[in-house]
Every structure is written in C-alpha cells, then in structure tokens.
C-alpha cells in the first residue's frame, strides 16, 4: 500500500473511531445505541466490509513496524455480555496480522491457583511483550463486573474479611487505574473495548445458537441465566467505564447489534492507536550498511 492510501485510511479510521471513545466520567450507557451504524445503512455493508479489509492491510503494515521496532507493546482488552461478538471481532480485526506478533488470552472463571493470588496476577503473566499486540478476551475487569453482580464470588476469593468493605469497587477502580498508568509509563499502549449489544439482539443470537446445529456448541445454559441479571450488569459496566476511562487507556463503547459495524469500529480504533505511535522501521547503522554491501557483492560474485 502506498503512503498516500495509508494516510488516507488512517484519517478515515480516526473519524470512525472517535465518536465511540469515552472521554469523560459523565458517560452514560443509555446514550449509546447498540444498533447505531452512524450514517451507514445496511446497503453500505459491502463497502464497510471492503473498508475493513483495507483496514486489516493497514493494521498488518503497522504491526510489522511495531514488531521490527520492538519498543512498544499494545494491549487490547475486550469486555462484553455473552454473544456480543468478542470472538468474531478479534478474529476479523486481527486476521491479517502476523501470528508471531500477536498473543491472545481468554480469562474464564479463576482456578484455585489463581485464587491463591491477587486478582491481577493471572493477567500480569499474560501481558504482551514489546513489539507485540496482546489481546485479553475478558480480563481483570471481570473483577468489577461478574464479581460485583454475584457477590458470592467475592466470598470465594480468600480475601481477609477486613478488606471487604463497602468501598471495594471504588478501591478496585483505583488500583486498576494505577496499574494501567504503570503499564503506560512502561511503553504498553492500552485500548479497551466494550461491545455493547442490546438485550433483544442477545436473545436473538442465543436462539440462533439453539436452532442452528453448527452453532449449538456455542450455547451454554448458564448464559441464559446471566440474562436475568441484565440491569445489574449494565449498571456495573457503566460505573466501571466511568471510573476507568483515562486519556492514556480509554474505553471504546462499540455498538454491537451489527457485527459488520462493530468490527469496522474496533479495527479503526486499533489503527488509530498504532498510528499515534509514529512507528517506523529501525534505522540501519553505517556498519550494517557496509555489511549489506559486502554481502551483496559476494552473492553477485557467485560465492
Ligand atoms: P463465549 O462467548 O464463547 O461464551 P466466554 O468468554 O463467555 O466465551 P465462557 O466459557 O463462557 O467464555 O467463560 C467465561 C466466564 O467466566 C464468564 O461467565 C465470566 O463472567 C467468567 N469469569 C471471568 N473472569 C472471572 C472472574 N474473575 N471471576 C468469576 N468469573 C469470571
Ligand atoms: Mg460465555
């Protein structure tokens, strides 16, 4: 891709991602419509898919430089209700990047070994190396979501009882903000995505999982149980986003009722994050240039 096309696409990506980045603590979830597709209609779907494909090319080029430069690490965090499309978004957005430069981790219910440690421990072990894009499919944010909605999970965390106060969620937000600030100061670029699906669309997708045999494996009866706590989850998500969106580690609340749109917005936000790093291939030293010239001569002389 030539430089002009790349610049052009980066500009478009910034424009697409911007409305969904949460910039202040007065954010309200109800202001974001899960069915939003901006001014694009379903007739624009093929064009959006094409744009995503081009976006994936840009991402691949940026990631190649990130890897070569070996200075920054990028951490992408995905949170959502079930069936919001986390897996599909991760799969499509990262489809063009070199697998060697990408590390994906899913965080499910903690194991007994995990519970023997502080809650960041299992995630810290999975942080991306410099030059890599790390993806967390769910994350330590579950500690302020599922654990908040189901207080009994907190009882199983083996915390000293004195530490379980009414301020526990506020404390967790503060600790997470500090942790992310620490990472940022170490060259880890953080972007967080909440894929915002509507209750109605989730129901539709669950029914598809039940009715279509090739989707049966995705269905878990527990998912329908969690639906009963929808409002509690939305409250927890809103509070979490308000308290943990920062300039350096912003949340994006991405409308998730239309998968093609969700993927385009996520790709755009990742492109924007990488473009902000002003990536370039490492400059080669004089000595290295000499070495290359000697090698070229030798090869051309048939040795
Ligand atoms: P899928 O979309 O395929 O269902 P998933 O990410 O929902 O993927 P599951 O196998 O359903 O994967 O497992 C994730 C479950 O683990 C979620 O219900 C989540 O709330 C739970 N979980 C994650 N982290 C924690 C945690 N710290 N404490 C308790 N439960 C957690
Ligand atoms: Mg699940």
Image (cartoon, rainbow, N blue to C red):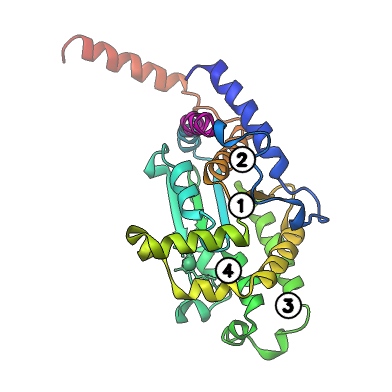
Where does label 4 land, which residue? Answer: 120
Q: Earlier in the sequence, mark 1 or mark 3?
A: 3
x 71%, y 84%: residue: 163
x 22%, y 10%: residue: 300
Give the Cα separation between the discs numbered 1 and 3.
23 Å
Element at label 4: loop
Q: Position of residue 176 (x, y in %)?
A: 68, 64
Q: Is residue 88 left or right of residue 153?
A: left
In the rendered image, the vertical position of residue 111 relative to residue 76, given as above or below: below
Residues tagged 2 and 1 counted as in contact (Cβ below 8 A): yes
Q: Which mark is residue 53?
A: none
Q: Position of residue 88 (x, y in %)?
A: 46, 50
Where does label 1 land, which residue? Answer: 193
Give the Cα separation between the discs numbered 2 and 4.
25 Å
Where does label 2 land, which residue? Answer: 269
Q: Position of residue 30 (x, y in %)?
A: 75, 56
In the rendered image, the vertical position of residue 153 relative to residue 28, given as above or below: below
């Amino acid at each position: 891709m030539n430089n002009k096309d790349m610049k052009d696409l980066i500009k478009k990506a910034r424009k697409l991602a911007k409305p969904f980045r949460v910039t202040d603590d007065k954010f309200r979830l109800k202001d974001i419509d899960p069915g939003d597709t901006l001014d694009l209609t379903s007739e624009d779907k093929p064009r959006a898919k094409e744009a995503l494909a081009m976006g994936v090319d840009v991402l691949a080029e940026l990631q190649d430089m990130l890897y070569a430069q070996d200075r920054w690490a990028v951490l992408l965090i995905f949170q959502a209700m079930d069936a919001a499309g986390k897996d599909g978004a991760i799969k499509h957005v990262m489809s063009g990047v070199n697998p060697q430069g990408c590390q994906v981790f899913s965080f499910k219910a903690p194991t007994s070994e995990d519970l023997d440690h502080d809650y960041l421990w299992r995630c810290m072990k999975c942080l991306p190396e410099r030059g890599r894009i790390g993806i967390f499919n769910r994350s330590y944010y579950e500690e302020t979501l599922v654990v908040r909605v189901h207080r009994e999970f907190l009882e199983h965390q083996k915390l000293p009882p004195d530490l379980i106060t009414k301020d526990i969620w506020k404390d967790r937000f503060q600790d997470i903000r500090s942790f992310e600030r620490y990472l940022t100061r170490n060259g880890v670029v953080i972007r967080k995505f909440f894929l915002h699906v509507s209750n109605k669309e989730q129901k539709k997708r669950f029914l598809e999982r039940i009715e279509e045999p090739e989707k049966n494996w995705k269905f878990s009866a527990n998912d329908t149980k969690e639906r009963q706590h929808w409002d509690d989850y939305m409250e927890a998500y809103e509070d979490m986003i308000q308290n943990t969106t920062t300039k350096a580690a912003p949340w994006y609340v991405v409308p998730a009722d239309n998968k093609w749109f969700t993927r385009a917005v996520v790709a755009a936000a990742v492109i924007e994050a990488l473009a902000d790093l002003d990536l370039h291939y490492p400059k080669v030293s004089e000595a290295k240039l000499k070495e290359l010239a000697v090698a070229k001569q030798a090869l051309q002389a048939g040795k």
